[in-house]
Image: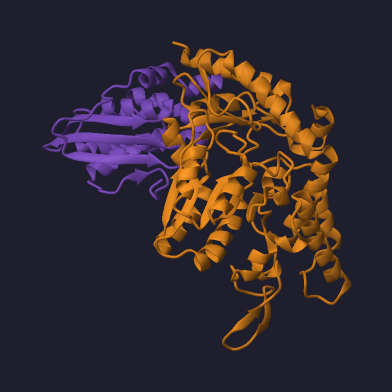
Chain colours: A orange, B purple
Amino acid sequence: MLDTVSVRADFPILAREENGKRLVYLDNAATSQKPRKVLDAIQHYYHFHNANVHRGAYTLAVEATEAYEAGRTAVAGFVNAWAREAVVFTRGTTESINLVASSWGRTNVQPGDRVVVTAMDHHSNIVPWQILCQEKGATLRMVEITEDGRIDLSDFGRALESKPKIVAFPYVSNSLGTVNPVAQLTRLAHAAGAVAVVDGAQAAPHLRVDVQAIDCDFFAFSGHKMLAPMGSGALIAKPALLEAMPPYHGGGEMIERVWDDHATWNKIPHKFEGGTPNVEAAVGLGAAIAYLEQLGMDRVAEHESALARVAIERLTQIEGVTIYGPRDHRAGVVPFTYGDIHPHDLATILDRDGVCIRAGHHCTQPLMRRLGVAATARASFYIYNDVDDIDALVSALRKAGELFGVPA
Amino acid sequence: MTDLGELYQQVILDHNRNPRNFRTVPGANRHAEGYNPLCGDRISLDVRVEDGVIQDVGFQGSGCAISKAAASLMTAAVHGKTTAEANELFRAFHAMLTGGPNAPGKLAAFAGVRAFPARVKCANLSWHALRAALEKIGEPVTTESPSD
C-alpha cells in the first residue's frame, strides 16, 4: 500500500471538513483531486512563462512553447506512445473520441458499414459513434456483457463477423470496474479489419498503460481524472493514421499555408490542434504525470486493487448490499446498491458524514438497463484513499440503513 | 442526524415505503411523463378531471425517497381539488422549496429539502408532471426544463 499519510498531505482540498467531518473523497472515477505540485506548476507557468505558443520570436514565447511541448513528451512517455507526434492534446476523453469519429470516421465509414461498441461503454464512447452512424447510414452494434460484468467474448466475436470498420471499447469500465483484455480485443478487431479505439479514461490514472503493447490504433484519456486540471487530456494515435486523417478543427496553428480559397495542413500533431491550446492543461498534466511516476503506476494499481478488495469484503458484510462487477480483474471502482434505498438518498446521507460517493447511471444507461437497475451507488478510490475511508463509508452506510429501516 | 431527520421525516419515509395512489387511473383524461435526466428518476402520472375537479390521480415510476414520497403526497393532496386549487398548491410547494413559507398540510414535510439544494429537483418532479398534465402539455417534462 502507498503511504497515504504523506500522499494526503500533498492535497490541500483533503484538509477541508464537511459538516465537521473529515472529507472522504470516493468519487475519483468522476474526477480526482489535485496535488500542490500540479497547482504550483500551473501557477508557476502563469507567473513566469505565459505567452502564446508556437509563434512568438521572443524568449517568453519560446519558454511557453517548451513548457507545452514538455507536457507532450511526458504524455508520450507515460503511455509509451509510438512517438511524441502521436500525442494530440484535447480537452479530454470525450473530445478525443469525437475527434476520431469526426475525422477518421467520416473519412472511412460508408453507408452500410458497421461500428462496434460494448454495452459497458460510457456515453462518450457510444454517442459519437451513434452520431457518425446516423450521418453515414452505418449501423452501430453493441456487444453484450456477461452475468459477472465482462465483455461477452463470444458476442464480441459474432459482432466482428460483420467486418466492422471501427471497434471501440473501454480499458476499464467506469460503472463496473472491469479491467478488459484490451490487447486481445485489439488483436481480434485487427483480424476483422477494423481499427481499435480504446477509451482509457479509467485506465490511464490507475494502471501502467502501454499503447504499443496493446497495439490499439487510438487511445483516449482525460487528465482531470489523474491529478491534472479539468480540460486536459489527449488522443494517442498511430502516426500513420494521423497523417492520413483530415483536420478536426480549422483555425490558426493547424495550417501550413493559407490561400484565399484553401489551405494546407501543419504537421501532426499540430494539424489537430487548431487555435490557442490549453497550455496550462499541458503543464498541469506534465506535473501530474511526474507525481504519479514518482509513486510508480504499478504501486498505484496495487494500492487501488487492495482497497477495492477490502471495500468489497466490508460491504458484503452489510446485509442487503449488492455489489456489481466481476470479483477479480477489477480496478478501484466499487458499484453497489443497498436494499431498496435509492442511491441518491444514500449519497445525500453519506455526504452528511463527509463521504462523497457517486449515485446515478454513471453515463452508462445501456449498461444500467442490462443490470436491471435505474441507478447504483459507486465508491471509487485513488492514491490518497485508505482503509479509514472505507471504514467511514461502511459506518455512514449503516446509518443510512438505520434511517431507512434496511433490512426491513 | 438532526438535519438528515429534517429531510427524511417519518411521513416521507412512510410514503416512500408505501406510496399512495401508486397505480394507473381508469378513464384518465390527462397524462404526463416526468424525467430527471441527471439521476434517472421517472414518473408517469395519470389524472381524471371532470368538471374542473381532479376526481382521481395516480402515479407510477421509480425514483429516490424524496421524489417518490413527493409524488405520493401530491396525489393525496390534490385528490378532489379543483384544477385551480391544485395549481395553487403547486405554487405553494414550489415557493416553499425556494425559500418561501411552508406549504399547507403534510406537504410541509418537504420544508427540509430547502437545506439540500441538490435534492430540490427530486421533490419538484411530480409537481411539474402534474402541471403539465393539467395544462395538457404533450411533451414529457424534465427537471432540466426552463420552468425550473
Q: Nearer the viewer, residue A165 or A99?
A: A165
Q: Nearer the viewer, residue B40 or A133?
A: A133
- Direction left: furthest residue: B51
- Direction right: furthest residue: A59
Q: Position of residue A195 (x, y in %)?
A: 57, 56
Q: Where A163 sits versus A209, above or below?
A: below
Residue at the spot x=59%, y=34% of the render?
A: A178
Q: Where A180 sits versus A312, above or below?
A: below
Q: Position of residue A401 (x, y in %)?
A: 52, 15
Quarter of the figure with the N terminus of chain A: top right
Q: Is residue A136 visible?
A: yes
Residue at the spot x=24%, y=26% of the render?
A: B23
Relative side of A165 to A82, left or right:
left
Quarter of the figure with the C terminus of chain A: top left
Q: Position of residue A192 (x, y in %)?
A: 53, 53
- Direction top: furthest residue: A408
Q: Position of residue B24 (x, y in %)?
A: 22, 30
Q: Nearer the viewer, residue A282 or A163?
A: A163
Quarter holding residue B49: top left
Residue at the spot x=29%, y=22% of the render?
A: B20
Relative side of A266 to A10, left or right:
left
Relative side of A186 to A50, left or right:
left
